[in-house]
Image (cartoon, grey):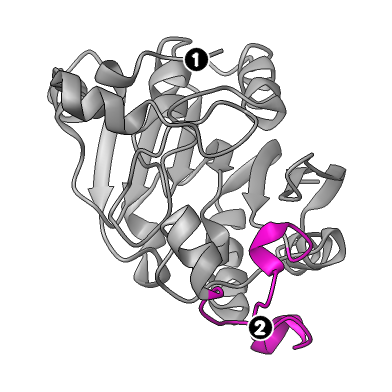
Amino acid sequence: MSIPVPYLVGERLTLSQYATVAKFTNPYGDHPIPTTGNHGLDIGGQRTDELDQSCLDFARTLQSPAPTAVDLGCGQGRMSIALAELGVRCWLVDQAPPSPVLQARITDPASHLRYLQCEIGALDADSLPTSIDILFSQRFIHYLAYPDAVRVLNALSARLRLGARLFLSASGLHSELGEDYPAHNAGINHRMALLSEPMAQKHQIHVPVCLYTTADLAALSDQAGLFPVRIWRSPFGNIKGIFEKP
């Protein structure tokens, strides 16, 4: 499912701007819409994938009168907006300020959205709800060094209700991002490096990343005390998983 590009960026585009973003960067029809300029393109704001849909399906099963969710590395906040429309109270966390579209929504007291702008590696879990039903993070965790990802996920896992679920994805070591990746042969605890120049330019990722395998994502969830419901590799090669708090 695609959303019109002007809606995503929160402003009306000129013809020349639209011609720029109308160039596809991959076979999925994604437009090259930047995020911070260093942290890749905004893919999650353009289409719903299997992990997104699984999260929404799970949200519809929640029996709590006031379910809560945390969207880690939320970007445009598309998932939180969708969850809020299902009655879920959402805490959105990102290092960048909210987009104009998102800002208009979070200032509405009836929106069920709260925005926390901070460096996620230094996130204070006390600023989040004490009981969380959904923890969602798409295409973000690879920006943290693995030991930092373990620490952040452990802090958040401690706030998950029994039966709560984590919906998590990371860029894959065996995707095209791994081509000539300097840390390709490093163990996960030390795997943090810039992408090769061609991949960095193509995907607009200009900061070090930790690329994952399915085993790495499983190990991350295990250290957070979460049970894997399903882990898979997307057609592009990214790693996705659904995990439950036992």
Identity, as a three-letter code, of the amino acid under mark 1: Ser
Q: How many marks overall?
A: 2
Question: Which label's residue is closer to the chain start, 2 or 1?
Answer: 1
Identity, as a three-letter code, of the amino acid under mark 2: Arg
Query: Is residue 180 rendered magenta in the image?
Result: yes
Q: What residue is drawn where x is 74% and y is 66%?
A: 173
Q: What residue is drawn where x is 77% and y is 86%?
A: 187
> Mark 2 and mark 1: span between their CA atoms?
34 Å
Does 82 sit left or right of 241 as displayed?
left
Query: Is residue 170 rendered magenta in the image?
Result: no
Q: Is residue 177 above or below residue 51?
A: below
Residue 209 sits in quarter:
bottom right
Q: Nearer the viewer, residue 132 or 8?
A: 8
Residue 1 sits in quarter:
top right
> Of the numbered discs in the image, which one, if any, rests on residue 191?
2
Q: What residue is drawn where x is 49% and y is 36%?
A: 43
Image location of residue 59, percent across then percent down: 61, 19
Can I make out residue 106 in this image?
Answer: no
Does 35 sit left or right of 50 as displayed?
left
User: Under tag 1, what secondary structure?
Assistant: loop
> Of the numbered discs in the image, which one, if any, rests on residue 2?
1
Does 103 sit left or right of 71 as displayed?
left
Mark 1 neighbour class, 10 Å CA radius: few under 14, some 14 to 19, many 20 or more: few
Q: Nearer the viewer, residue 139 or 224?
A: 139
Between marks 2 and 1 in the image, the one whose residue lies nearer the viewer: 1
Q: What residue is drawn where x is 26% and y is 23%?
A: 18
Residue numbers of the magenta segment: 173-196
Does 14 sit left or right of 112 as displayed?
left
Image location of residue 117, percent across then percent down: 23, 53
Image location of residue 242, percent across then percent down: 76, 40
